[in-house]
Amino acid sequence: MAAISREEVAHLARLSRLAVTEEELDTFAGQLDVILQAVAQVGTVAAADIPPTSHSVPLTNVLREDVETPCLTPEEALSGAPDVEEQRFRVPRILNEDLAS
Amino acid sequence: MTTTLPAYDEVVARYEPVIGLETHVELGTRTKMFCGCPTDFGGEPNTRVCPVCLGLPGSLPVANKAAIEATIRIGLALNCSIAEWCRFARKNYFYPDMPKNFQISQYDEPLCVDGYLDVEVNGETVRIGIERVHLEEDTGKTLHVGGATGRIHGATESLVDYNRAGIPLVEIVTKPIPGTGALAPEVARAYVTELRDVIRSLGVSDVRMEEGSLRCDVNTSLNLPGEEWGTRTETKNVNSLRSVERAVRSEMLRQASVLDAGGRITQETRHFHEDTGDTTPGRSKETATDYRYFPEPDLVPLAPDPAWVAELKAALPELPRVHRRRLQEQWGLSDLDMQSVLNAGAVELIEQTVAAGATPAAARKWWLGELSRRANETGRELADIGATPAQVAELQGLVDAGKLNDKLARVVLEGVVAGEGSPTEIMTNRNLEVVSDTGALTAAVDEAIAANAAIADKVRSGKVAAAGALVGAVMKSTQGQADAKTVRELILARLGVEG
């Protein structure tokens, strides 16, 4: 059984705002399936008593003090922007979507 | 399309509301959640940004200890359990308000869970369950241009300022609140008010709704008695305490009219409009974004030391509810009187006025009387009226010293509100002090007696009540700046009559 379906790849492409052709969907679905199958082999050696790992380093509580550090200048901050207006990043409008929080 | 809405009384007689609130609080830390950029309100666009909050390649976030501490303190004040171990998560979505294309948030492992907040509504205590308190980062500000200004519809471009992106944001989510019936809108408002006061007492945020450091989303559903809870809608853009109440009420009315007509409620986000008090549909939850949350690999887990949490708990300040009880006792107020102080938003102001030397009764008189009246007239909050507790205490001091009578004190207070200076300055500059110079007063009294010989005779013959007209004449000639009682005594003495 495939680890990822063609429909799931199409869904992910839409969420990622990627325009993918029908031929590309076939290609990517196949490639991603191979990758996922390979990664899934880890699961065959993981015993039931091994919890899923999210971090490879055994650290907790890496925190910083609430102290200011220098910012970029607006010129530096905007230097990589595709377009700038009124010292702001200028981007195409996005319809029918809302803020995250 | 306009539909006639049913009457509120009929709605709550037929349906039972269930509400829920999600509140976002911007923390008042000096720096952002994951980088050292300052968090001050305002500022030129894109001047408080760095590679971390701009999501530039190779940059790595590090969590702000003060923000973690503030969140744990909020959780403790809301009677929550604090997680012994939890992780941040990436909430993936493509919208330009976050330059990384994800927001660092918490998902299935919030820092604080399962608490409650007791609020008072109409003298009754309602316990609001708290589902979770978690920490995330705020988004940037998007300005839509081309088409109607500020509106996304018709806009051709968006301009983004990332100064606010990355400011620590605490999200506080209640459990569903059933059983409040007709009081649902008031319960919602009372909860947000109490939550604001609790957070303010902790000193972790300035919690100003008008500046957006406290933001509220309101969930509302209706069901028939005995049936399952209905489909809920989530109303956003609720930017004042009054709007919280109005939003719940208006959504109850709208949903009832849909249900009455045999329709069904769509699970969706709705936007509240301050001007009309109505909500309009936004994003439909049926096509909601798939956020594909996963543990944030760039931040290691949090494991707050239980000893540290215990320390924070022991150091919590007196919470507003307990504090108010103590004040009510100290001020000797009935529940009803205390309620009117609360409704006027005058608790702290009276407390500070008393601390500045006034008696509780005098402090309450000014704040609930003259100043509340002016606040209502001008549509301002009492705290922003322009008079400070210290000035009110000073004013009362002048009254107590006999330098101002009640009428003159009101004139002086008006000057204070208009920004003319301190009460003493205004009294001196405008020459409003009570005439206590007996020589000047005696002259005025003699003048009044001479000008009103017939009345003076009546008083001499024992009709003491007639002296009122003479007092009035003196008060008039001294432009109200004499103490009426002193004037009366002087007149009677002059006419050889016992008072």
Image (cartoon, coloured by chain):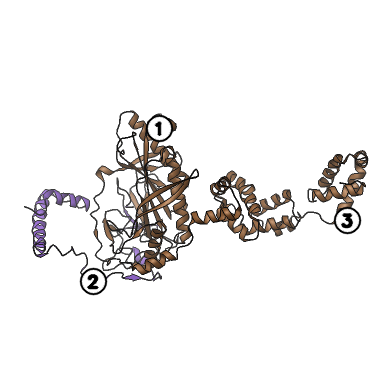
Chain colours: A purple, B brown
The image quarter containing residue B458 is top right
Q: Is residue B211 left or right of residue B173?
A: right
Residue at x 64%, y 47% (from the top left corner): B370
Task: Identify residue type, mark 3.
Answer: Gly
Q: Which numbered disc covers residue B11? A: 1
Q: Chain of mark 2?
A: A
Circle 3/circle 2 CB separation < 8 Å:
no
- What residue sits right under mark 2 in the picture? A58
- What residue sits right under mark 3 in the picture? B439
Image x and y of residue B63, in percent? 33, 67
Q: Chain of mark 1?
A: B
Residue at x 37%, y 36% (from the top left corner): B16
SS label for mark 3: helix
Task: Identify residue type, mark 1.
Answer: Val
Q: Distance between the Cα atoms at labels 1 and 2? A: 57 Å
Quarter holding the N terminus of chain B is top left
Image x and y of residue A63, in percent? 33, 70
Residue at x 43%, y 50% (from the top left corner): B118
Q: Front-most of B309 and B457?
A: B309
SS label for mark 2: loop
Task: Identify residue type, mark 2.
Answer: Pro
Q: Chain of mark 3?
A: B
Q: Name above or below for residue B100 compared with residue B308.
A: above
Q: Distance between the Cα atoms at labels 3 and 1? A: 72 Å
Q: Is residue A88 left or right of residue B489?
A: left
